[in-house]
Image (spheres, rainbow, N blue to C red):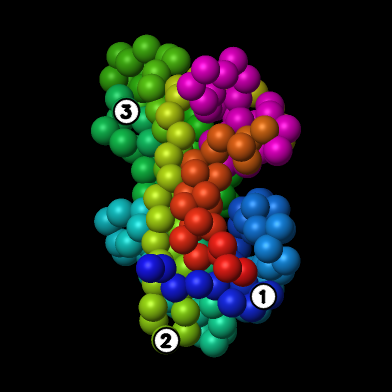
Amino acid sequence: MARQFEGSELIVASLNPGKVREIGELLADFGVKPISAGELGLPEPVEDGDTFIANAEIKAIAAATAAGKIALSDDSGFAVDALNGDPGIFSARWAGPGKDFSVAMQAVKDKLEEGGQPIPTPASFICALCLAWPDGHTESFEGKVTGQFVWPARGEKGFGYDPVFEAEGMDITFAEMEPSEKHAISHRADAFRQLIDACFKGA
């Protein structure tokens, strides 16, 4: 059986305010207050894992150890089938040092066109979550939502690659959806369902 989360504060090992806010919304029913690693000035570890789960574990363990509290990290990315799963674990890096995702989305489009690939084209969002305790124990989960990369980018409500992703069966992008709609079907929601079932049912 997975170890249960106890307490009311959770360190979120991310400097991305959109991600911290979304995690707070997903855990609101459990009375959990998310505190970002940025607020605490925690150092960012080197993410040198070769999978989403490996990178999530690196971040969560680093934050839990530094803060002495339970930490949750999320390593998520956008994977395009025709690009062999790229940008994948490098999704944020494609946005450049300024973390400008309009640059990243344009890069995906350019690479598809260079390879003579049609657009729309199959793509998915993947989210790995890792809950880490200060003693080094971890619980990890991975969620996924499939759909397609579309162009041009549409919508203002999401972040990251949301404006160029339509989930299967949808005709609007993640960035055009109300947050509650997106939370119901997203990769992060899938991973969170697994996390909550395993670690929060007793919270």
Query: Is residue 190 positioned above or below 55 on the image?
Result: above
Query: Is residue 140 positioned above or below 107 on the image?
Result: below
Cα distance in 3D space between marks 1 and 3: 38 Å
- 9 lies left or right of 166: right
Residue 9: image tag = 1
Q: Which residue is mark 2?
A: 135
Q: Position of residue 39 (x, y in %)?
A: 68, 73
Q: Residue at x 64, y 23 (%)?
A: 154
- Going from N to C along the chain, the mark reached first, 2 or 1, is 1
Q: Is residue 44 visible?
A: no
Q: Position of residue 187 (x, y in %)?
A: 49, 41
Cα distance in 3D space between marks 2 and 1: 17 Å
The residue under label 3 is which amino acid type? Asp
Segment tinted magenta in the rendering: 158-180
Closer to us: mark 1 or mark 3? Answer: 1
**Crowd around label 1: few <14 · some 14–19 · many ≥20 (10 Å):** some
- 58 lies left or right of 151: left
- Going from N to C along the chain, the mark reached first, 1 or 3, is 1
The residue under label 2 is which amino acid type? Asp
The residue under label 1 is which amino acid type? Glu
Cα distance in 3D space between marks 2 and 3: 38 Å
The quadrant in which residue 147 appears is top left
Q: Residue at x 55, y 72 (%)?
A: 5
Q: Position of residue 44 (x, y in %)?
A: 49, 72
Query: Is residue 42 positioned above or below 103 on the image?
Result: below
- Quarter placement of the C terminus: bottom right
Q: Which residue is mark 3?
A: 81
